[in-house]
Image: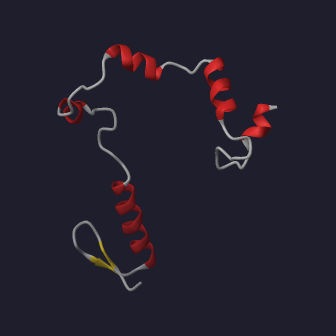
Amino acid sequence: MVGLHDKTDTWVTGEKEMEKVAVEYFSELFTTTSPNDFTDLLDGIPTVISETDNALLTRPALEEEVRAALFLMNPEKAPGPDGMTALFFQK
């Protein structure tokens, strides 16, 4: 790499300067200025789910529901990236 343009469009060629430009660029790219304020964005999205449905969807799963779902799985299939088959959990 020969050089990089910094925020002010200045061409920098030194190793430390290029490192600083790259770190600043990617830090700004992956950082938000207001991570908790989504009000403006959410105001434009229509509500299509009721409060009751939302409460049902966001409540913790019951042990009986997890057990029923687990025993509906094919025992030879791997349900996740850990590679453990459903059979392991069914026993």
**If the image is split into quadrants, where does the C terminus sit?**
top right
Q: Residue at x 65, y 50 (%)?
A: 81
For this rendering, which residue is in front, 15 or 53?
53
66 vs 2, left or right, is right
- Quadrant location of residue 25? bottom left
Q: Residue furthest bottom?
A: 2
Q: Quadrant of residue 40?
A: top left
Q: Position of residue 37 (x, y in %)?
A: 28, 32
Q: Nearer the viewer, residue 84 or 34?
A: 84
Judged from this view, the residue extending furthest toward the right is: 91
Please state, as top left, top right, bottom left or bottom right, where the N terminus lies in the image.
bottom left
Instruction: Work out whether residue 36 or residue 49 is closer to the camera in this orientation and state it.
Output: 49
Question: Residue 26: x percent and y percent?
Answer: 39, 60
- Viewer-proximal residue among 10 and 27: 27
* Residue appearing at x 29%, y 70% in the figure: 6
Q: Position of residue 58 (x, y in %)?
A: 46, 22
Along the horizontal axis of the image, is 43 left or right of 21?
left
